[in-house]
Image (spheres, helix red, strand yellow):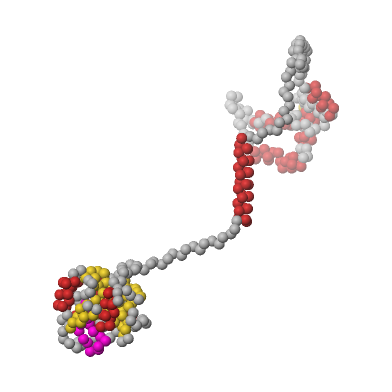
Amino acid sequence: MDQGSYNLKAIKDIEKALPKNLSNPPEDSTRPINALPDYEVRTMKDDLAELGLTKLEREAKGMPTEEEFETGGKPGVPIIKHAEGEIKREIPAPEALPTAPKKSALPSTEELVSEKEEEMPFVRPRPEPAPKTMPEIEEAPPVPETEKLKIPEVSYAPATPSHKKRILLLIIAAIIVIGGFGVGAFFLWPKTTPEPTPTPNPPTTPKPSTALISVNQTKIITLTNEKSLFETLKDEAKSEQTINTFKRIAILKNEREFISLNEFFQALEIPVSPYTLGDLKTNYTLVIFSQGTGKRLGIIAEVQNPEDLKNQMRDWEQTMLDDLKNFYVSDVPGARANKTFLDDIYQGVAIRYVNLPYTTLTLNYTIPNNLLIVGTSKELMYTTIDRILGK
């Protein structure tokens, strides 16, 4: 596009930019001079209508508009059109637009390296240290002569162990010696059979007092609540026993005590006068005599006052047979043959007796040598007197 077309386009742009009331003179020339011009309000809608759809489509497609085509593609240059169709280019040529600086080519690797080397800051070199001056060498002390040095002589004596080690060695040696003696004694010493451990002895049965006459055997029985003394004596009378022998019966009331004379009379249910018991001592001997016709029971007791006891026994004769009914453990006594007691003498000893239906059964008593003898047969009485007198 030439210069004329460019100027024409610029004029047109200026004319469009001016308001319409300035580009076209008003019809009414009678309007006052000082009156303000009538401005017209522009809207975006009107501007788009003036531009037209063609211009917008060209801009969207990237094609030049009519103005760009007339101005040679250089916007901003006004072109004024007059009514006669002439175009006047009154606007001077626009100033030359500043040209953009040319882009320099990329530097090469060598140039970059050289530039960096040039841009490095200057580093002041470190000052070299001043040379050290050699100190004056002091004279070494004189080496001592060989003769003056004392070298310790080498000792070849073996090192002695410490005190603790010596004690430890002595203890170990003593243990070895004692252990050797023990092992030797274990194998060489004659082995003896160990003694059996003694078994605890059962509780010993208490011994009764010494019998008042010589007896052939002694039997200890225990009084229990399950069986009376009379039944126990009857069972004992049934046991085997040599004829013409005495078996002593000792009665325990517990594990360690024998019954007393008074307890014996109570256990056999024999009523005895207190005066009679007062003349008797606590020591007594109960025997079972074995004879050809059966077993007979007798008792021997120590006497404190023989003469007084004789009087007490005569008073007891009236009920003595009935009171001593449990004294017959083998046979029933029965009714008496005579009403009163009779006198009898054997070996110079006076005897009081009463006859019963059987001649082998009697009730008699005597008091020789401060001893009271009560028996249930004449043979038992005579044999007892013989043993007391030692015949």
Which quarter of the rendered picture does the N terminus lie within? top right
Splitting the image into 4 quarters, where does residue 366 fall? Answer: bottom left
Residue 290 vertical placement versus 75 (above, below): below
Location of residue 77 in the rendering, given as x and y in whole percent from the top left corner: 75, 29
For this view, does 228 lie left or right of residue 43? left
For this view, does 59 lie left or right of residue 378? right
Splitting the image into 4 quarters, where does residue 222 fall? Answer: bottom left
Q: Could you tell me which residue is drawn at 22 percent across and 74 percent down?
A: 368
Residue 133 vertical placement versus 314 (above, below): above
Which quarter of the rendered picture does the C terminus lie within? bottom left
Counting the numbered discs, the total is 0
Q: Which of 57/78 is in front?
A: 57
Q: Could you tell me which residue is drawn at 66 percent across and 32 percent down?
A: 20
State whether residue 230 appears in this view.
no
Name the residue at the top extreme: 136
Q: Which of 53/227 is in front?
A: 227
- Is 188 magenta? The answer is no
For this view, does 237 lie left or right of residue 50? left
Location of residue 383 in the rendering, given as x and y in whole percent from the top left corner: 29, 79
Q: Which of 133/340 is in front?
A: 340
Residue 262 vertical placement versus 176 (above, below): below
For this view, does 90 lie left or right of residue 349? right
- Is 358 magenta? The answer is yes
State whether residue 305 appears in this view.
yes
Location of residue 195 in the rendering, given as x and y in whole percent from the top left corner: 52, 62
Q: Which residues are magenta?
A: 353-366
